[in-house]
Image (cartoon, grey):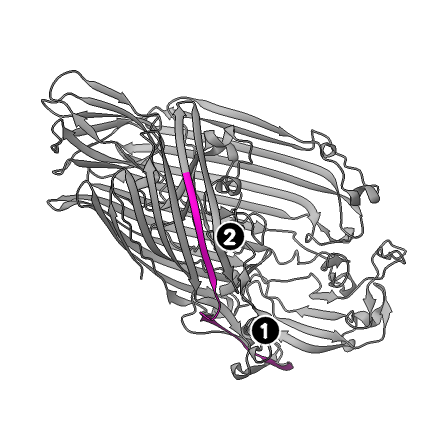
Amino acid sequence: MGLALILMVGAQAWAQGRQYGNLRGTAKDATDSILPGVTIEVTSEALQGTRTTVTDLNGNYQIVGLPPGQYSASFALQNFATVDRQFNVEVGRDTAVNVAMPVGGVREAVDVLGAVPTPLTETEISQNITGDRVDTLPMARDLFSIAELAPGLTANTVTDGQIAINGSFGYDNIYLIDGVDINDNLLGTANDLFIEDAIDETQILTSGISAEYGRFSGGVVNAITKSGGNRFSGSFRASLFKPDWTARTPFEIENDNDRTGTLADNTTYETTVGGPIVRDRLWFFYANRRQRESADDTLPVSGASFVRSVENDRNLIKLTGSIAPGHTLEGSYLRNMTNQVRPSIPSAIDPATLTSPEIPNDLWVATYRGAVNSSLFIEGRVSRREFGSRNQGGTLTAAKESPFLSVFQGTGLDLFNAPAFDSNDPEDRNNRQVTASATYFLPTELGTHSIKGGFEHFQSTRTTGGSQSATSFIFIAPYAENPDGSPLLDADGRFVPLFGAPAPFFPIRLEYFPVLGASIDINTLSFYVNDSWAVNDHVSVNLGVRAEKITSDATDSLVGLDTSAAVPRLSLGDGRFTFQTTYSHYVGKYSESQFARNTIVGIAPELEQEYIGPPGQGRNFAPGFDDANYETVGADFPTQNVFFEDGLKSPRTKEFTVSGGAALGTRGYAKVTYINRRASDFVEDFVTLDGGSTTVTGNDGEEFGTFSNLNFRNTDALERNYDGLEFQGRFQATNAFLIDGSYTVQINNDGNFEGEARSAGAISSNAFDYPEVTPANRYYPTGRLKNFQRH
């Protein structure tokens, strides 16, 4: 269950994170008396047809579900002069347009396009960035780069492509395209299910986020794509690159490796086109992106040269139709196909580790929005995202074709001899999402209520046996070196593995028993309701509840999850000078990297075996590949010696904020916010003397030995604490000149729980692995976390 309570003195705050904007306001006469019954009609090139409503008994009105863009509105009432207004609507925000209507007289028109929609009255901390603004800035145009412009956010994370918001885990944010979650299931990075020139506007929410959204402890990156219009329009962009435009590194010069490649082999083209099929009834939008990259690259340690290449094709088609005034159907499909030539892992040092993976990525979305009447707005959406990985690893099955890892040479994780992973075990990371909501506008003598309720069913699916090698083996062993320290190659130009070397170089063999095609579904069913109550012109209250039920189902009918989660907020403010405070709980995502830990999905059962045979070297040294020369010293069989406590849940983050700000006339604002976050309920594995042990057996009943149990449970014995200050400001000096910026200071970003690792997503620590001999001050001391960045 979740509870959100907001008390705010000032303008009303509606639910955020939407894929549209809202219009609201109050109509009064020249004596400041309210005017019920005023008819408001809005038009825009972004809108199919028109939308109308009337003011209620308190003189208030709202129009929900307006596509972002420039709008005109007329306010009409018998015996009063008609008033015209022009304004902008932004994604995820409310635009307030209040009018004072003179009696009779001449029609009044006011252009307020230059006025900045101020976030002073909004309880969340957010940043809106349009595609046009991105085009004017010297920056990359993907969602990760756009998000970096927001306050409270850093890219100083353990995995490339992640963002950390207010000290949160880098894997624990939500990326949305047209309302659909496009996160990678494990890493929390955004799938490239967009074409940069097709992004219309992006909103980044970092604090005080509505209970309408869950499954994160960081923030929300909410982007929408273009939809076409009543006029044909389009764009074409060519990005050209030549490898020798970049200077060679000293390592490339030392190994006499040139950078070759032509402009024709290193280009990216983007095309967009949109327009009407039937004016005001049916629009189309199409976008295409074609990327080709091919250039010489150099492997670390060995200095071997290879040609790294990328072929990426993306196509987007989107249709938007008006089935009746105020009722819209929208459907889109995006196909993203990538083919690469690259090393199996970044620390690969041997040309034999190169792979040619194929990465298919698809997104289907269908959305309905409708204004049933002036008081009721409803919305529904269904979607499916698919992400796959094919030909990711090796194909040869002879033991001597196994991957070798050297952990005491070169990079510290040198991969040689063969690719890691198994091309016979393709991986899929998919999701399905169904959402529905209704917003009801209810005027009463005690104020006006905007009540929004809805549900979301989100299913995250991962399919893979977690095979680490096509041979079922990985050897941890060093390679032979020349006197100058470079790798020694045999007569076939292959690396020479060493067997029986003195400690710490003695070989370890990891043997895996994957179940190819193993799968897990993690299901999150959420319900929420928010009542935004405008008591009067100065006071509003927002009361909300969110309930989540999380379950999982995996191959072999394993059940690992059965739990639930929560949210609260409070805000205060007054007049031109606004003061606010919010209090929120965020419950993080249920990632397969953590909550499939007691299954065989992505985690193949594993034996750790120590080499006890004679010393030798080379790929043809038979004793090094003989089963009789290995002794089992460890095992990890997730379905036998890994256990979840009942009610195991994702970590929780509690957030408290205080904000103060002021409007700079009608063209800008300045705002400062203090953010305090404290995380708890960390997911930890406990390996203790009283945790027991299990005799691990194979499918044929063979006993491999007795090994300690891993018991996963939540703990508050560890900590992650964040305190920060965020400064935001914007000023529209002229219609053509905008000053917009933010500045963040991390006062404190400390703790003793990292909870994530490079390219791994959520993980546990070693804090409670044999705690009898691992004291806290030595094995998990408190200090600055890895994503600390003062400014």
Residue situated in front as seen by the camera: 561 or 339: 561
Residue 698 occupies which quadrant of the picture? bottom right
Residue type beneath disc 1 = Phe
Magenta stretch holds residue 720: yes
Please identify the dominant SS of the magenta region.
strand
Query: Mark 1: few, some, or many residues within 10 Å (few <14, many ≥20)?
Result: many
| Residue 188, label in figure | 2
Residue situated in front as seen by the camera: 331 or 579: 579
Q: Secondary structure at mark 2?
A: loop
Q: Position of residue 360 (x, y in %)?
A: 57, 46
Q: Residue furthest top?
A: 106
Stretch in magenta = 703-728
Return the disc, 1 or 2, that comes first in the chain's sequence.
2
| Residue 637, label in figure | 1
Residue type beneath disc 2 = Gly
Query: Is residue 204 at all visible to an observer of this figure?
Result: no
